[in-house]
């Protein structure tokens, strides 16, 4: 079921754009490297990949795949995100294996990446980055990042961000798109200001219905000015004090790959509502209709449909809150533990706009369940954490299943929930394999 397919091999990546490949794989910056002079972190990454020092590294041309890697069929990883699974490299899409989600706040190195287009160039002066607020407002605004930092109350919150298509790999027939298994999710500690405060300064007119977000990432076609994605949220979600305009992540300036200098984080909703490289918020008098809002995108059938059904567009509605879900982060699947001895099983749970009320774990394929204590979130929309000591009675193969229940009593399903044309919202229980010896 788990699809570890790499969309393009290393050789193909290098054939098509060797300098970009260098940047992706080794973090070599082509401009600084024109004559192939390899140093610093890029060299360290290459040394680690080939498994030995490279005495003549200074002669190595940029865009050259080390022969040690060129003829292997092994997958490749991206610089700074070494532990992640490459679901696609153009656009860059990286999934986190569940055991790397173990820390309460997901480290930047482990945080999944979902791009629909390219990555813009790093801004030479981040504080000069401009954001426009226009449309159904009394006073259209143009604010620099420096003005956002100085002019609005700063907020730091832990907020979960999950791709709408997380779990897509579980649907059958298989919808097209990244075959995310479970790790297109993370819990970041984000610093920024409230979207509501900025909209308040602009003065939202009574005619305002929805936001439309725009970012600076280039479309894969190379067509200038064509957005890769432009989604938005209803005004009520934009006005929620947890919807932020963000410039910091885990205490650092927001990394370029996560939308730096500036992005939206609209927690609990499909990740696509959280526009990266944010340049404009267009306040609209109707549901936004940018790329990613219409047709089948980020929409689900109004009524349940049979797997594989053709659903007419008028029966598709915009997906809002993500469903209740949990992940087992320790032990790592395929672990071996001692029989008849307790060991810790732990993980996190979240529930879109809701909170998680209960968490249960089973070691006998769901026949019996243990209630597991779960923490309160540090703030609304933060991950909740759980842990329990489990003992496997005899030697043999076990599965550990985890199941969260939200505060409206809705529980994660045992099997894949309602099929939908693009494969959104699969919140089936997470299962791991553990062998007792
Ligand atoms: N400008 C822009 N914003 C974007 C995207 C994008 O392609 N371009 N992808 C969206 C999607 S689909 C998701 S799931 C999240 C992923 O955020 P991350 O890459 O920081 O994990 O960013 C969203 N914001
Ligand atoms: Mo997404």
Image: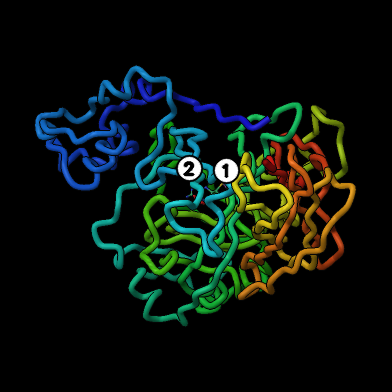
Tags 1 and 2 touching, CB below 8 Å: no
Point out residue 125 in the picture as x, y percentages from the top left corner. Answer: 25, 62
**Which structural element holds mark 1?**
loop
Q: Residue at (16%, 38%) from the top-left corner?
A: 38
Q: Residue furthest top?
A: 71
Point out residue 429 in the picture as x, y percentages from the top left corner. Answer: 76, 47
In the image, residue 4 sits, relative to residue 202, either above or below, namely: above
Camera sees residue 294: no
Q: Quadrant of residue 435?
A: top right
Q: Residue at (77%, 61%) from the top-left corner?
A: 359
Q: Residue furthest right?
A: 367
Point out residue 286 in the picture as x, y percentages from the top left corner. Answer: 67, 57
* Disc 1 from disc 2: Cα separation: 27 Å
Looking at the rendered image, the quarter that the C terminus falls into is top right
Left-right relation of 369 to 188: right
Q: Residue at (44%, 53%) from the top-left corner?
A: 258
Within 10 Å of disc 2 (Cα), the crowding (few <14, some 14-19, many 20+) is: many
**Which structural element holds mark 2?**
loop
Identify the mark nearer the N-term, 1 or 2.
2
Looking at the rendered image, the quarter that the N terminus falls into is top right
In this rendering, the label closer to the viewer, 1 or 2: 2
Foreground: 126 or 28?
A: 28
Q: Label 2, on which residue?
A: 84
Foreground: 121 or 294?
A: 121
Q: Quadrant of residue 266?
A: bottom right
Q: Label 1, on which residue?
A: 291
């Amino acid at each position: 079921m788990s699809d570890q397919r790499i969309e393009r091999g290393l050789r193909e990546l290098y054939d098509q754009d060797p300098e970009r490949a260098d940047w992706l794989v080794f973090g070599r910056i082509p401009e600084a490297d024109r004559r192939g002079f390899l140093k610093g972190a890029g060299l360290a990454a290459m040394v680690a990949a080939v498994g030995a020092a490279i005495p003549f590294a200074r002669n190595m041309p940029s865009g050259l795949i080390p022969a040690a890697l060129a003829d292997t069929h092994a997958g490749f990883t991206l610089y700074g995100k070494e532990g992640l699974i490459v679901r696609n490299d153009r656009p860059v899409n990286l999934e986190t294996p569940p055991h790397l989600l173990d820390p309460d706040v997901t480290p930047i190195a482990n945080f999944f990446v979902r791009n629909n287009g390219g990555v813009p160039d790093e801004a030479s002066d981040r504080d000069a980055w401009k954001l426009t607020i226009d449309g159904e407002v009394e006073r259209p605004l143009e604010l620099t990042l420096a003005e956002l930092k100085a002019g609005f109350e700063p907020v730091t919150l832990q907020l979960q961000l999950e791709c709408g298509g997380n779990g897509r790999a579980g649907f059958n027939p298989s919808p097209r798109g990244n075959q995310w298994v479970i790790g297109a999710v993370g819990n970041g500690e984000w610093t920024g200001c409230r979207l509501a405060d900025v909209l308040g300064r602009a003065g939202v007119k009574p005619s305002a219905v929805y936001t439309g977000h725009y970012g600076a990432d280039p479309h894969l076609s190379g067509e200038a000015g064509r957005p890769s994605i432009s989604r938005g949220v209803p005004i009520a979600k934009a006005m929620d004090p947890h919807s932020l305009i963000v410039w910091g992540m885990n205490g650092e300036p927001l990394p370029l790959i996560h939308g730096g200098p500036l992005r939206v984080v609209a927690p609990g909703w499909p990740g696509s509502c959280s526009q990266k490289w944010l340049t404009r918020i267009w306040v609209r008098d109707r549901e936004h209709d940018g790329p990613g809002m219409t047709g089948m995108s980020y929409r689900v059938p109004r009524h349940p449909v049979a797997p594989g059904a053709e659903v007419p567009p008028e029966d598709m509605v915009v997906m809002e809150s993500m469903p209740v879900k949990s992940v087992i982060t320790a032990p790592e699947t395929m672990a071996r533990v001692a029989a008849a001895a307790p060991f810790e099983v732990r993980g996190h749970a979240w529930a879109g706009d809701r909170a998680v009320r209960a968490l249960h774990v089973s070691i006998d394929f769901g026949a019996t369940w243990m209630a597991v204590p779960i923490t309160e979130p540090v703030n609304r929309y933060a991950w909740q954490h759980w842990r329990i000591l489990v003992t496997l009675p005899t030697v043999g193969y076990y599965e550990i299943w985890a199941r969260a229940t939200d505060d409206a009593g809705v529980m994660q399903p045992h099997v894949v929930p309602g099929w939908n044309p693009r494969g959104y919202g699969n919140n089936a229980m997470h299962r791991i394999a553990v062998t007792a010896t």
